[in-house]
Amino acid sequence: MEFPLDASASASALPPLESYRGILFDLDGVLTPTADIHMLAWRTLFTEVFAEKAVDLPYTNDDYYRYLDGKTRYEGVAGLLASRGIDLPWGSPDDPSSADTVSGVGNRKNDVFTRVLTEQGIAPYPGSLALVRRLHEEGVPMGVVSSSANARWVLTAAGLLDYFPVLVDGVLAAEEHLASKPAGDMFVRGARGIGVDPAEAVVFEDAISGVAAGRAGGFGLVVGVNRGVGESALLESGAHVVVDDLAAFLGNER
């Protein structure tokens, strides 16, 4: 089932989720507001890195959306460093956070993220939690597809892990050599995990790269969740519809 890219985001125009056999959710910005913590951690990290390397062009939120949002950690780091003319060896995931490598910088960001999340805690968006609970009660197959290597920890901290027997995260992507978003590989792997064909499944995504990944994977419905990127940007990236909150679907599922 296809919907026009200019489809209305009003609740009355939303396609019913009952038309699909499974649902895949991105995590940060869709189920939990961890995107805010990620943004703070990235800003803190690259402000320090750019100061150390005497980079004149400061880090901005545009850097986050252009190079980091929806990407695996090391790919995002490499892309942003390259944008400032910084060429570091890739290194190894086991590099200490002090290492002057792409992996070392990525691990340093993880230290910052872990500290902030531990201090602040995390709770799911109320509308997202309500929809997940409803779908769970109805036995709809669900999974989480996140580029984050911290996804399992975040789901556990938010009390959501038991709802999602299938988790395709940054750890699994590295183990199975899955291309990160905007490639559709991770979502296709998620669909396989919940036992449905992508054409019969729904993707919920708030990132431009994630929306593009849903379309690249051939998913029947790609829902853009506007947490700040903007409705037009999500539609242009391939979202069939855009909502501000997942609660918009509470009257549309089985």
Image (cartoon, grey):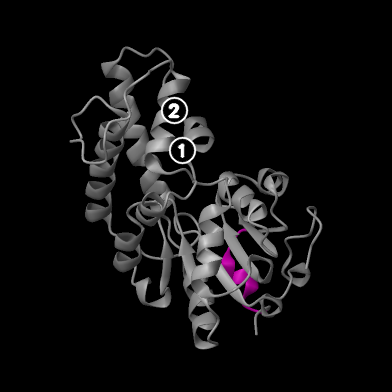
* Residue name at image x 78 percent, y 53 percent: 5
Question: In the rendering, which numbered label is found on residue 38?
Answer: none
Point out residue 129 in the picture as x, y percentages from the top left corner. Answer: 47, 72
Residue positioned most to the bottom: 138
Locate residue 47: give its quadrant. Answer: top left
**Which residue is rendered at x = 25% and y = 49% of the image?**
114
Magenta includes 30? no
Relative side of 96 to 240, left or right? left
Question: Which element carries disc 2, helix, strand or loop?
Answer: helix
Quarter of the figure with residue 135: bottom right
Residue closest to the eye, 55 or 95: 95
Check residue 68 in the rendering and tell me which mark sits there, or answer none.
1
Q: Examine the rendering and report whether any part of residue 122 can be seen.
A: no
Q: Position of residue 21 (x, y in %)?
A: 63, 78
CA neighbours of label 2 inside 10 A, class few (<14), some (14 to 19), many (20+): some
Amino acid at the residue labelled 1: Leu
Is label 1 in a helix, a strand or a loop?
A: helix
Q: Which residue appears at 38% of the width and 41% of the height?
A: 73
Q: Is residue 65 above or below residue 179?
A: above
- Work out whether 158 lies above or below 83: below
Residue 150 percent coordinates (x, y): 32, 54
- Quadrant of the snapshot with the N terminus: bottom right
Magenta segment: 244-251
221 or 245, which is in the foreground?
A: 221
Which amino acid, by three-letter code, is at mark 2?
Leu
Image spot of residue 100 (x, y percent): 24, 24
**Cα separation between marks 1 and 2:** 8 Å
Q: Badge 2 is on which residue? A: 80
**Residue 181 is at least partly visible in this image:** yes
From the viewer's perspective, is 133 left or right of 51?
right
